[in-house]
Amino acid sequence: MPVAASAIYFLNLRGDVLINRLYRDDVGGNMVDAFRMHIMQTKELGTCPVRQIGGCSFFYMRISNVYIVIVVSSNANVACAFKFVVEAVNLFKSYFGGAFDEDAIRNNFVLIYELLDEIMDFGYPQNLSPEILKLYITQEGVRSPFSSKAAERPVPNATLQVTGAVGWRREGLVYKKNEVFLDIVESVNLLMSSKGSVLRCDVTGKILMKCFLSGMPDLKLGLNDKIGLEKESQIKSRPTKSGKTIELDDVTFHQCVNLTRFNSEKTVSFVPPDGEFELMKYRITEGVNLPFRVLPTIKELGRTRMEVNVKVKSVFGAKMFALGVVVKIPVPKQTAKTSFQVTSGRAKYNASIDCLVWKIRKFPGQTEPTLSAEVELISTMAEKKSWTRPPIQMEFQVPMFTASGLRVRFLKVWEKSGYNTVEWVRYITKAGSYEIRC
């Protein structure tokens, strides 16, 4: 069920109403007094963003020094309500030049009333796209003096943009050089036992695009996913030579992707928005290529000494390298003194996090640097508690490497004028929760 909001209020931190809009007559005008008395004055604002008072529900969110409160009198979709608030704030920021606070509301209350009438009808959310609304609400907001963003000029032909199928892109775009930048960014999550067996491993990734294309182009993206390649071979009636294939899980797309075509042909085809956007997100749990293997050995020599030996092996190709590699090796809290020997990078003891921090700025592939450390502990007369040995944590970034094995097979651009495009593809793998028990 959608939001079905009865009213929306914008309050400052004192609880004064800056602006409000009543969409239904099923709530009284004193609803904001109930919010002030039962929520703001009782200092329960940080406990839960959804509260029920009498027969009404209050959904509220703080943005800068402004509280946005939605009042509903019936059952409603809470997630949809907060999504509406976030999108509405982004819309206001696009008109105000990037600022949304009490001063911006006071300076633009006429424009806000006009926008509130457009983005919600009888309590139901409508179109909140800044690109479309700026085509027929051409009034410019009072911009913040701290904003350096240039004002955008409205584009004519508003009727086509509002009613057309491509609401996320306006017509008439022209670029001297037509380029497409595509980034595949992956985060590796790993939990490995002290004996080297993988307990949990998965990859979460996203495909980011930045398009500077003229006209209204149609793009088609081909990946080495198993289902898509099998469907392509069926359509072409011949086997496809693709090398390694992967299975994508939990795939979500940007609204520009043609889902009907994806369901039938398993191809990602779309008319892209102008500029930067997130095309898709995915997750992979099988066949993950771990970029690093960590082999730790920690020996406790009595109550006052420890020996730490850690070997880190880079599994990716010898021509690749990782950047910003950080290995955090936990030590007991009663650590008094440490001494190190490393074959690469630098190491030091960080008492604030109780870890030996080993940093390697540039880590080549197919190498095995090691760290050896002697740790002296403070001997206490109190009863000694066993050390729990927290896991070793890693941070890294490996350019031109994907832990999932995902590859872009092709990126095709069609436009009626037939111009040439330049495509740039980049792969980046980063550490998510990369932990090794010791």
Image (tube, grey):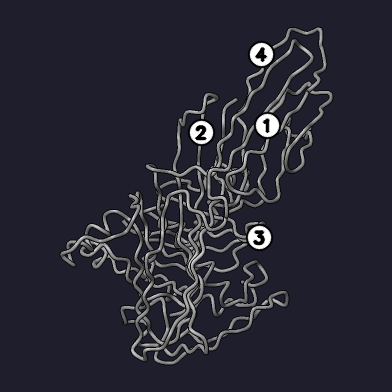
Q: Which quadrant is home to the N terminus? A: bottom left
**348 sits to left or right of 159:** right
Disc marking residue 39? none
Q: Amino acid at mark 1?
A: Ile
61 w.r.t. 333: above or below = below
The residue that disc 3 covers is 65
Pick whichever of labels 1 and 4 is earlier in the sequence. 1
Q: Earlier in the sequence, mark 2 or mark 4?
A: 2
Q: Secondary structure at mark 3?
A: loop
Q: Which SS class for mark 2?
A: strand
Cα separation between marks 3 and 1: 41 Å
Q: Does residue 293 appear in the picture of this structure? A: yes
**Secondary structure beneath disc 1?**
strand
Q: Which of the two discs, 3 and 1, sits closer to the camera? A: 1
Depth check, mark 1 against mark 4: the one in front is 1
Residue drawn where x is 38% and y is 54% of the image: 73
Residue hosting label 4:
386
Crowd around label 3: few <14 · some 14–19 · many ≥20 (10 Å): few
* Residue behind mark 1: 329
Who's the residue at 54% across and 86% down the image?
139
